[in-house]
Image (cartoon, helix red, strand yellow):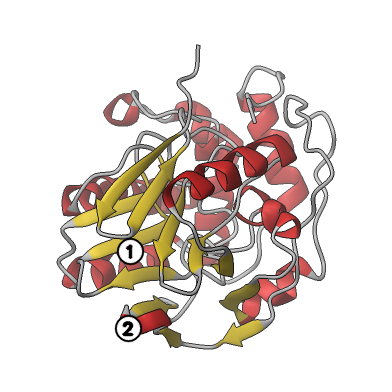
Amino acid sequence: MTASPSMQELASGVWAYIQPDGGWMINNMGVIRGSSGATSVDATSSERRTRDYLRAIGRVSEVPVKRVVLTHSHPDHCNGTSLMPDAEIIAHRNVADDLQRPHALAPHIFQSFEQGAIEPRIPTLIFEDAVTIDPDGRRIEVRHPGGPAHTSGDAYVWLPDERVLFTGDLVFHGGMPFALSGSPAGWLRAIEQMAVLDPAIVVPGHGPVGGPELFGPVADYLHFLIDAAAEARDRGLTPLEAARALDLARFGDLMEQERIVGNLHRAVAELDGVEPDFARAWQEMYEYNGMRPLACHA
């Protein structure tokens, strides 16, 4: 049985909301309390999960959520914002663009789940490089890594006084990193940027809270991916053929092994200077998974 979500206090007035097991559509959020209102780092995927999250916020904070920082445009991090209708929505410009042209997946790709009566809201405050929020004297820095990484519109949230870093999906802890919407090379640069901050606490987009030791495994995987893509291209293999030939033993404990196919689609396309075929990448992830829908327990 999957464990229940938990609100973990990281510093005075700062919490991480951790949702096990961190698989597809089961993400983490953050809560940063001020005297007049709270800042939420991301929302979540379904009406049930978002209502649970809002109740958990109410147990630790007497002030309402006045702003939501979106770390990127994927639905697990954005869907629940419609249940915070009065909150300011802060995101990178590319998130705003993505949310205005959502891409639906073929229904057989994922196991079905009940999303409920929610939908993502379009950001109301858009930034290009960075924005600093200072609610009641607590400095909150929101930074774009300068280019595509996990997606084209990533943001990480840095609390310099508390040395707490909310990475969004720039860090996965326990799940395979997923680069189909971004850039493996750019993601490595983003990891380097975050590491320079020397955070004491790192809250990944999925999986348990840790420290700066969480950066190394993500970088290790991305280097492996880039090398595998170069070899596949040299050998004339398709991403699916290359994925089936790869030995993933080094990463055998990571969830969502099917992501290797989507990642290779992106990494090979990046070498060729083109965009991947997204529909084909998702279909081949499904095929790699034994023609079974990808597990989703949202």
Amino acid type, mark 1: Leu
Quadrant in the picture for the C terminus: top right
Image location (x, y in percent) of residue 232: 47, 45
Q: Residue at label 1?
A: 188
Check disc 2: other Cα within 10 Å, few if <14, some if 14-19, many if 20+. few
Name the residue at the top extreme: 1
Residue positioned 78% across, 30% down in the render: 114
- Depicted 164 relative to depicted 240: above or below: below
Say if residue 224 shows up in the picture. Answer: yes
User: Quadrant of residue 217 in the image?
Assistant: top left
Residue positioned 49% across, 67% down in the render: 39
Q: Is residue 298 left or right of residue 210?
A: right
Amino acid type, mark 2: Gly
Which element is circle 2 on? Answer: helix
Q: Is residue 192 left or right of residue 208?
A: left
Image location (x, y in percent) of residue 69: 53, 69
User: Quadrant of residue 124 in the image?
Assistant: bottom right
**In terms of sequence position, does the residue under pointer 2 or pointer 1 come before the other?**
2
- Depicted 33 relative to depicted 58: above or below: below
Name the residue at the front extreme: 62
Q: Which mark is residue 137?
A: 2
Check disc 1: other Cα within 10 Å, few if <14, some if 14-19, many if 20+. many
